[in-house]
Image (cartoon, rainbow, N blue to C red):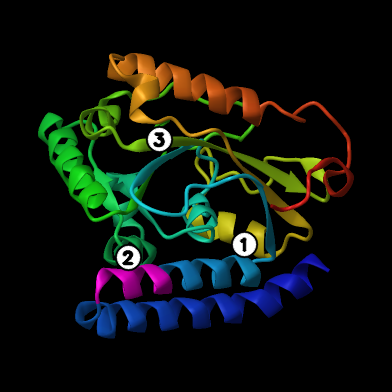
Amino acid sequence: MAAVLFVLRLPLVLIWLVSSLLCVALVYPVVGLSIRSSLNHAWSRMLMAICGVRLRIVGQPSMRGEALWVANHVSWIDIFILSSVRCVAFIAKRDIRDWPVIGWLVEKAGTVFIDRTQRHSVRHVGEQMQGMFRQGQVVGLFAEGTTSTGFDVLPFHASLFEPPLRTGVLIQPVALRFFHRGQRSDRIAFVGEQSLAANLAILLASTSTCVEVEFLPALTAQHYEGWTRAQLAAFIREQIREAVAVGADSETNVNQALPEKQ
C-alpha cells in the first residue's frame, strides 16, 4: 500500500511543483499582495491534499489584520500547514534558502530568511517584520530555530520578539501535534541528518497522517505591556509546550479524542 501511494502521489507533487514555479515566475510579479496571498493559500491547501495530510483546527485563528503566529516546528510542511489556514509570511533559517527549488519557491512566496550567526541579519529581519505588520499580514515564527520530534518544544530564540513588542501586534501561539494512524507520532518529523527527499518519500508513502493545529488564546499589547522579549518568549513557549504535551503519552485514537473542526 505504501509503495502504491508513493507512486500515485509523486507525479501529483511534481505537477504541483512545476505549476507553483510557473505561477511564481510569471504571475506573482504582475499581481498585488492580496492575490499572491490567495494563491499561496490555495497552493498550500492543494499540497496538503496531495500528500494526504488531514488538518484538524482547534481554537480560533486570527483571520484578519496583522498578527504574529508563533508555532513549534516539526517538519518542512509546517509552512504549508499554517498557510492552509491563512496565508502566512514566514521567518525561516537561512539554510532553507539553499534547498533545491523549494528554497527559491518559498522565498518568492514571501518567506524572509535569517542567519542567526549574523547580528545585522536579526536587525534586518526585524525591520522586514515591521513592514509586513504595516501591510496587515500575519507573520509566522518558528522560534525554536530548528525542528524537533514534536513531543516537546525546544528553547526559543527571543531576538525576533522585539518587533512585535515595539509594534504592539497581536501574538497568537500555535501548537502543532502530529498523528499517524490515530496515534501521536514523529514519523514525518524532519530531524537529524535526514534529507528533504527522504522525508518527502516517507510522507508520500504514509496513510492516515493528521496534524492537529491548535490556536491558543491570542495576546494583545495590553497583555504583554512592560515585558521584555525574553519574558514574552518564555511565556509563549510555555503555552505551546503545554498544548503540545496534550495526548503525547496517550494511545487514544485521534478520530475519537479530538474535537471537531471549528
Q: How far is the residue under mark 2 from the one under mark 1? A: 24 Å
Residue placed farthest to the left in the image?
120
Q: Which residue is mark 3?
A: 171
Determine whether the residue tagged by mark 3 lies in a helix, strand or loop. strand
Where is 89 relative to 73, above or below?
below
Q: Nearer the viewer, residue 98 or 64?
A: 64
Amino acid type of the residue tagged 1 in the rendering:
Ala
Q: CB of mark 3 within 8 Å of CB of mark 1?
A: no
Q: Nearer the viewer, residue 129 or 181?
A: 129
Where is 228 relative to 59, above or below?
above
Q: Per the image, is 197 magenta?
A: no
- Relative horizontal placement of residue 183, taking residue 70 as reference (left or right): right
Q: Residue at x 25, y 80 (%)?
A: 31
Amino acid type of the residue tagged 2 in the rendering:
Ala
Mark 2 and mark 1 lie on one chain; the one further toward the N terminus is 2
Amino acid type of the residue tagged 3 in the rendering:
Ile
The residue segment tinted magenta is: 32-39
Q: Per the image, is 37 magenta?
A: yes
Q: Which residue is mark 1?
A: 201
Where residue 64 sits in the image (x, y, percent)?
41, 54
